Structure formats: structure tokens, C-alpha cells
Image (cartoon, rainbow, N blue to C red):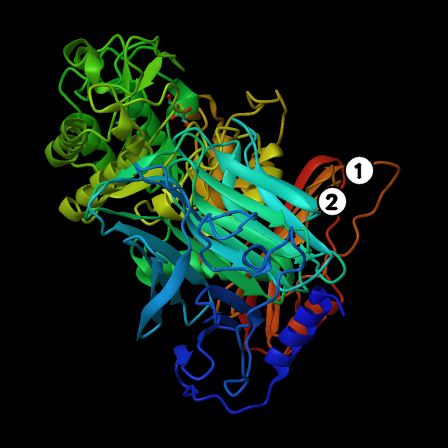
Amino acid sequence: MTSMRVRVILRVMAILGSVLSATPASARASYDAALRVFRLDGGDITYAFGVTQAGLLESVYWGPRLASEDTLSAYDLPGLSSVDPAASISGQEYPGWGGGLYTEPTLKLAYPDGVRDVVLHYVKHRISGDTITIELADISRPIHVTLRYTIDPDTGIIGRSAAIRNDGDVPVRLDQASSAAWSLPIGDDYRLHYLTGRWAAEWTLESRPVTAGSTVIESRRGSTSHQANPWFAIDRAGLSTEEAGPVWFGALAWSGSWRISVDRDPIGDVRVVGGLNPFDFAYQLKPGESLDTPIFYAGYSGHGMGGASRLLHRFERTKILPGGSSARLRPVLYNSWEATEFAVDEPGQMALAEKAAKIGIERFVMDDGWFGARNNDHAGLGDWFVNPTKFPNGLKPLIDKVHGLGMEFGLWVEPEMVNADSNLYRAHPDWVIGMSGRPKTEQRNQMVLNLARTDVRDYVLKAVDDLVTKNDIQFLKWDHNRNWSEPGWPGIDPAEQQKLYVAYVENLYYIMRELRRRHPKLEIESCSGGGGRVDLGIMALTDQVWPSDNTDPFDRLTIQDGFTHAYAPGVMMAWVTDSPNWVNNRTTSLKYRFLSSMQGGLGVGANLSRWTDADFAEATRLVAAYKQIRRTVLQGDLYRLISPDNNSERSATFYVSPDKAQAVLFAFLHSSTKLDRMPSIQVTGLDPAKRYKMRAIDADPNAADPIQSGAYWMAHGVDLSLVGDFQADGRIFDVVESTRR
Ligand code: GLA
């Protein structure tokens, strides 16, 4: 019998075993001392790992929730052959590079004497509530790793991180420090899904079979990146669909360079290793120092990609975002960027604010151009004082005006950057990231401030804090418009310079945390040239994100579809802008633009001075309709009914409120041909026994609209007669207590 077969049988036996476990049924985090197995139960999942006889910490089970009396065991597997030793095929939870490991390590290091291997063995553990802490140590040198596991009782999403501590008396250089390795059950039809993109084209969903070898998704850019996003989902080609079948998924809480590697090893096992990107990484741990890795969250759903994203959305809403379950719903905002670009001034912004207030906008945001010598993107970044020509009386008159119109006031900032043409750079040319004596590549004419320096961190914090303290500002759109290049930290020991990758991001988080502490009502949007910095790390400190600079309402359908695979619609801002749109010169109706944007946090970014009275009237109606469905869209369950991917002619999304009292359908048609009829749209997620009245999104709520059971709407479907190019429709379903009409 091959060792692969042995393993399958052992694992099946482990799962189906009927020996009574010592674990109390109520415990969410537990340890079976006899079998040396740790177990986390939460939501609909069970996760288990154990200590082998050899002392390695090995993955045991990750999938649907098991009965509390089921027994799970960790096994010392024999090597497969002389070239596939046990260490390499055993699915370790946190493998060090050593002991014959040829698969992806989580930890790789080097001592000054040339020793470069590390073999981590279990030492002890602690269990407290939903958390298990495991202490690992190298077999002979004083390097310790503390693994932390927490499980969310609601969603079963597990957060894992590692703290690597040098307890010796010589420095240790870490060359790779990942957060976790996740092992999937044995299977041969795994399919990986991940998100890629570029500026104005973020959130493209890629899918590929997990075949032998590695798929690496990563950012080497110093921040999260447009190019790839630190999220993955793996389903099974033979079993999984949008709404059914197993899906394992995960997301890294880190806004710096990161890497997730999905490997299928020579014996067919699939593992996901993720954390700080080892590319160009070197972190000196002095004696007594430790490094905490970012948290790598992961979960499991038996309800397809849709179920996986709904779990993630709920987790983000309740456990990641500031405010958790009691966070405010996103205010409807206006943003000036596409209307005025850098040409902002007091009268122009006041005029826009008056028009914005008329349609029901709740937050007015002045974008780039208000500070320093900022008339274009060549100057001013770094000088966070109000431009005296554009705002001779400071910001107060505009802010007062906006408040007087009943709206909050928000401001664009890009605090991590500097233009060469700025007072800040002239005073502190040494404050930017770069390599001594080498050119500094500029992008959008700007350089990146070295936030890892304490003096720069303190300057940036003070500049933004002053701005928010001296002006009555409720919201900051925090931008980050370029990636790093020449990522050096001039002026310090070369051996320490690559700490930049960690220290920069930690200081960014520190600044945002401190600003929120000092200004508890301040809200922040994470923007990075569009969607270049969206991840669970920044989301813990920001209230909403800007998914893309691409505001074409048709392109947005695929952008938003990709986005919602990983992130909650409740943070996804979407603006209604002008038509034809600048991206594709495409013309769409105001209704189409609104319905595209109403699927997330609604904003308006059009030049309102060009709008007709009819535009204002229609926008006012649609903003009012949005406010009636906002809680359902932002906090409900999202069902992606028809994907806009692969040049689909149609697409549809459906949002159901947590209590199933309201649902909203958005449907889009690209173009009809040859008298095509729109097929009925089978909605899902309603309560079959409840009765729902369905009305058009922009119609009178008291109109005589059809009332049917949830069962009817889900089985019979909804007939929409969309005909033409770029057509859109929306329907609201409200539970009614009344009898059949
Ligand atoms: C970035 C943002 C835009 C806008 C401009 C301003 O590109 O993504 O929304 O704020 O900067 O310069």
C-alpha cells in the first residue's frame, strides 16, 4: 500500500473515529491531552492540529464542523522515499526551513556563524476562551515561535499569527517570516481563485486548477497593491459552484509587501503559506527582540463561493471594521475630484455643496488641490496647509457652509508622500525612501516618505492631527498614489534597512490608530490610486475603501463583483459620475449609473453644475430610494445571482437583510440582440414562508405592486423586461403581513 493510501485511510479513520473525546462539548478551543490534538470549533467549522511523536506540530483537520465526541489524531507519517522525507510531506502548521523540508517554509533564518536551518518542536500551550497559544522552540538554538490561533464563534473564521523571538545572545536574521501554513484535505480537483488587477482595472477574478507546483500571488511594492490582493479561495472543481460545495478561503491583514503561495507538493497535498513577502526581506532580530507577523485569517464554507464571501463579509463587518456591529451605515457622499480635479476654490466648492445638498447628500468631500502649491500633481504634497489663494479665509467658511447645508465635511489627504517641489522636501530631503547615492524613481512626480523613521512618523501624525484639530472635519480620504521603488532606509546600518518593510506599515497603523483615538468621531477612507490598499489590516483602521478610480458604471460591475469575493459591500464606495465617462467614453443613463453605484456605499462624483433639473429630480428620487435599502445593501447577505464575468450579457446581484424582512435586486443588461428576452431571475435567500411585496426601486412605495411568498419569488423568479444597451433595473422586496391581493 502506498503511503498516500495509508494517509487517506488514517485521516478518514481519524475523522470517523468514535472514541469519546475528553473535550467538553461547550469548549470552542480545546486540547485532547491523550491524543495531543488541539481543536477549534466555531460557526460551522472544526479546525484541528496536533503534536506528532516526533514533536512536530501538524495539521489534522479543517472543514465542516464535527461532533464534539469525534476523535482526531496527529500521525507520524513515514517518508515516501529517500527524496520525499517525512518532514516534507507532513503538513506542518509552522514549518521551519530545516530537517529535510522541501516544501514552502514559514520560517527561514540565518545566524552569524553560518547556521541557517531551524527545526521547530512543540514546547507548551495555553488555552483561553477562543484562543490557543502554542510555544515552539528550535531543537537546539534559543529561537522561539509563539503561534496564536483564535476562532470567531460566529463565522468559524480562524486568525493565525506567529511571534518569533530571539532568546539568544547573538542576532538572528529572518529571511522569511510567514504568518501561517494552511493544509487542505487530500483532494485532487482543487481550483484556486484570486484577485488581480492594475490601476483602473482592479479586482479581476482569476481561477486556475491547483496542479503540481506553486502559484504565488504577491506584492513587492511596499503596499497591498492593485496587481494582486492578499485573498484566496480554493474550491473543488467537481463539487463547488457559486452557491454550493466546499470552499476554503483566507485573507491577510497586512498593508505592506505580502505573499501567498499555494503549493501542491509531490505527493499531491495542497498547502497555502502566507505572510510577509520574503522577497528582498531581511529582518535582524537582536538578542531579546521579537517580530510579530500579520494575522492570516481563513475560513471554510460548504455553500460555495457565495457562502464563503458572505462569511467573510459578516466577519469583516462584525470583527474587523472599526465600530464592529454598531458601526454607522456609510453616509451618501459627494466627492469633487472628477468635477474639478485640482481647480478647487471656495466659491466653486460652495456652489457644488449647495447642489449636492439638494439631492440628499450627507457628506461633502473636497478632494485633491486644496493645500500647499497644489495646482497639479507636480507640487505641494507634504505641505499640509491650506492654499491661501484658493481659500483666502482658510477652510472655515466652506466647512461652515457645508455644515449649514446639513452635510458632514471631508477632506482628501495623501500624508505618506512628498513632491520634490514642496517645502517639506526642501527642508528634509533625507526623509524619503531611497538608496544612498542612487536616483530615486518618481511616480506621479512624488516620493514616499520613510514612515519607518520615528521623526517622519511623528511629523505625519502631527500634520494630520493639526488639520483635524483646527478644522471641523468628519472624514479623511487617505490616499497613497504610488508604490515603493529603491526601498532603502538611508542613514542607518545597512543590515537594518530592510526592516523598512515592517516598520513602515506598523507606523502607518500607529498613526491611524492614534488619530482615531484622538478624534473618535473621525472616519477614514482607504484609497490608493483607487483600490491599491484594501486588506484586512487597513480595514481595521478605516471605515470604507475606494475600490477603483474607474467610475465607468459598466466596468464597475465586474470590478465590484471581484471586490465582493473578498470584501464587504458595506465598505465599497461607488460614485455616480458624468456620462460619457472618462474611462471608456461610454454613455449611460443616470439610472444605470445610480443602480451600478447603489450596490455599495453610494457616492456622487459628477460635475453637478452641468446637471439639468430633470437630472436633479431623478437623482433626488434615487438617493431617497437608496436610503430605504441602505441597511440591506450594506449589512445584508449578498447573493451574486448572475456574474458579469466573461463578457456576460447580463448580471444581477441580490441583497437580503439579516432578518429577511427586505431584499433588493439589481439587474443589468449589456445589450440585447435579435429580440432576446431576459430570462426570469431566480432570487435566493428569502424566507419561503414570508410574503414579500415587490416594487421598482424608483417607484412610489405605496403603489399596487405584486405580493407573493418568498418561495414564489425564489422558484418562479422575477421577470424584468430589459431591452436595449446598458439597461438597468432594481426591485425592492419588503415583507408584508397582509393577505394575498
Ligand atoms: C487618486 C485617487 C482619486 C483622486 C486623485 C487625486 O488617483 O484615487 O480618487 O483622489 O488621487 O489626486
Residue 731 shows in this picture? no
Amino acid type, callout 1: Ser
As measured in the structure, the alpha-carbon distance from the residue carrying label 2 to the one carrying label 1 is 8 Å
Where is residue 140? Give x, y as percent.
Answer: 33, 56
First along the sequence among labels 2 and 1: 1
**Dot 1 beta carbon under 8 Å from ligand 1:** no
Q: Position of residue 464 (x, y in %)?
A: 18, 31
Q: What residue is shown with label 1?
A: 672
State the SS at label 2. Answer: loop
Tell me which amino acid carries mark 2: Leu
Residue located 19% across and 41% down the image: 515
User: Where 428 falls versus 544 (above or below)?
Assistant: above
Q: Which mark is residue 722?
A: 2
Quadrant of the displayed image that contains ligand 1: top left
Residue 82 visible, this angle = yes
- Image coordinates of residue 260 in percent, x first then y, are 51, 44
Front-lying residue, 10 or 674: 10
Residue 54 lies left or right of residue 114; in this view the side is right
Residue 70 falls in image quadrant: bottom right
Give above or below for 228 relative to 262. Answer: above
Q: Is mark 2 in CB contact (under 8 Å) with mark 1?
A: yes
Camera-side residue: 500 or 540? Answer: 500
Left/right placement of residue 567 relative to residue 417 reads right
Q: Quadrant of the N terminus?
A: bottom right
Q: Position of residue 458 (x, y in %)?
A: 14, 31
For label 2, being within 8 Å of ligand 1 is answered no
Q: Which mark is residue 536?
A: none
Q: Secondary structure at mark 1?
A: loop
